[in-house]
Image (tube, helix red, strand yellow):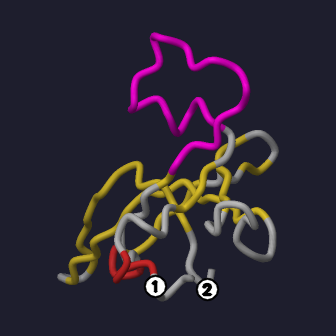
Amino acid sequence: MQGLAVVCVLCFFSFKDKWVLYECAVVHWFNVIGDAPDEDMGMWVVQPSFNDHSPDISVIHIDTIYHAAHLLPIYSTDPIPHHLKFYHSLDHFCAFYVNKFADHHAFKIAF
């Protein structure tokens, strides 16, 4: 994806050290699946990254965040539970398409 990565921001925070303000985010990283976009959809596929069954989480400076990404769940043949809410999507689905059609100007750099 042209050197871009997908993360899920869990928390924004800031702190001062020697009178310098550092604005940061706690993020959960996503891995890109494959070396090219999906042939059928034309979009990159990502999945949450884990280290020994623990989420791959780190702190980054907010200046390294380029733009919001719109993730589309990759559905299976199983029905979606009626109790599933939109805010559970990142926990329920295993892989996602990075929607390049959500914002043409922001995503043309990666595609």
Residue shown at the point (57%, 20%) measured from the top left: 80
Quadrant location of residue 34? bottom right
Q: Where residue 4 sits in the image (x, y, percent)?
A: 56, 80
Helix, strand or loop at label 2? It is loop
Residue shown at the point (56%, 33%) measured from the top left: 91
Q: Amino acid at mark 2?
A: Gly
| 88 magenta-colored | yes
Question: Disc 2 or 1, which lies upstream in sequence?
Answer: 2
Which residue position holds label 2? 3
Q: Where residue 11 sits in the image (x, y, percent)?
A: 35, 51
Q: Is residue 31 above or below residue 71?
A: below
Q: Where residue 31 sits in the image (x, y, percent)?
A: 69, 62
Quadrant location of residue 46? bottom right
Numbered disc in front, either 2 or 1: 1
Residue shown at the point (48%, 69%) measured from the top left: 100
Left or right position of 89 against 64: right
Q: Amino acid at mark 1?
A: Lys
Q: Is the residue marked by circle 2 packed among few (<14), some (14-19), or many (20+) residues within 10 Å? A: few
Q: CB atoms at circles 2 and 1 under 8 Å apart? A: no
Which residue position holds label 1? 108
**Outermost residue toward the front?**
40
Q: Is the residue marked by circle 1 packed among few (<14), some (14-19), or many (20+) residues within 10 Å? A: few
Observer-nearest of 34 and 11: 34
Left or right position of 81 against 9: right
Observer-nearest of 18 and 83: 83
| 32 magenta-colored | no
Observer-nearest of 18 and 2: 2
Q: CA distance from mark 2 to mark 1?
A: 13 Å
Question: Which segment is the magenta one?
Answer: 72-93
Left or right position of 106 against 75: left
Helix, strand or loop at label 1? It is loop
**Outermost residue toward the top?**
82
